[in-house]
Image: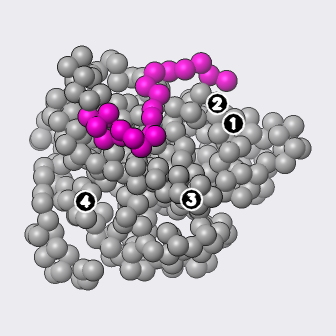
Amino acid sequence: MANGHESHQGLLHSLPKEKGWIGLPLYQYQGSWCHAKGIQAAISLQNHFHAIESDVILVTTPKSGTTWLKALAFAILNRHRYTNLSQNPLLTHNPHDLVPFFEFNLYTDNQLPNLSDLPSPRLFATHIPYPWLPESIKISNCKIVYLCRNPKDTLVSYWHFTNKARPEILGPLSLEKGFELFCKGITGFGPFWDHALGYWNENLERPQKVLFLKYEELKKDIKYQVKRLAEFMGYPFTIEEERDGVIDEISRLCSFECLRSLEVNKSGKSISYFENQTLFRKGEVGDWVNYLTIPMVEQFDQLMEEKLCGSGLTFDMYPQHRK
Ligand code: PAP
């Protein structure tokens, strides 16, 4: 395990490197692609983080609904503190400011956060692939919630987002180039397939430990998925809460339309230098049909078949009737 600035630089020099999407290089570390700071933070996390049983860890690949999942988990776990909706911090804070990322916030730039005073249950988020998680997260009884999104929409969302974050001097990244990188697995914390399958397989083996959610299923029936999430985290809704419309309230508060309309999400920055408003683009299933060409779709479908064949992991690619 690397330690200190020099050994980190030494480690980076030894790794395969590719030009990333936003101008920062991505390095291939233990099978996954990541920017230099993310690798440093992941190593620091492995060395210093101690999970406790009540922790809840939210995991996603970038652009698969992280902001939504953070809002939902925060609203569910804190619902007794903020019974008056007008006082809910989600109305005045971006979800990324309420649920910290291990790699972008807590362990970035060699910080060693003191997490022992955080109220229980502690809620954290990460894009880190399963093999990079600290042992204490893997072996303790803490809970992992994984949210996945169909890879075509994830790719299109990632492409839009990174183009907004690219320095002007580099000009926009073409969709053809983004498509090529995504298919080669070169995305932040990618390959997408390995990331999703890492958590999918853990979910199959230990469903009490890892909950596997899909963006498209949240879109289809948010109330059912909110109930599922609350039960899994150990905070199920009571019959009275259900009767009083608490699930509806949380679903509405965390919806794309509601979050996007809030002042706090129209300006300012929460993750690194990314503008909050870039986190709320379209929020739909199936937007990829407006971008990918027929040859791209054919190539992608073949790749998806190869990568996911036999795993049991499937995705809805088109919008479905909502409940
Ligand atoms: P991150 O990984 O950088 O945090 P993340 O939140 O995972 O980003 O992804 C943003 C996507 O989720 C955007 O998708 P789009 O580009 O296809 O529009 C964004 O619109 C969508 N999104 C953000 N909040 C919500 C929400 N509350 N409900 C549904 N989709 C959402």
Under mark 4, the amino acid is: Gly
Is disc 1 placed on a helix, strand or loop? helix
Under mark 1, the amino acid is: Tyr
Q: CA distance from mark 2 to mark 4?
A: 35 Å
| Mark 3 or 2, nearer chain start | 3
Quick one: quadrant of the N terminus?
A: bottom left
Is disc 4 placed on a helix, strand or loop? loop
Number of numbered markers: 4
In magenta stretch: residue 42: no
Q: Which residues are magenta?
A: 303-323
Crowd rating for badge 4 (residues with CA inside 10 Å; few <14, some 14–19, many 20+): some
Under mark 3, the amino acid is: Arg
Q: Is the residue indicated by label 2 positioned so its CB lies within 8 Å of ligand 1?
A: no
Q: CA distance from mark 2 to mark 1?
A: 6 Å
Residue 261 screen position, x and y as percent: 55, 32
Disc on res. 31: 4
Disc on res. 206: 3
| Mark 4 or 3, nearer chain start | 4
Q: Which of the two discs, 3 and 2, sits closer to the camera?
A: 3
Residue 194 screen position, x and y as percent: 33, 50
Q: CA distance from mark 3 to mark 1?
A: 21 Å
Residue 111 screen position, x and y as percent: 38, 76
Q: CA distance from mark 4 to mark 3?
A: 23 Å
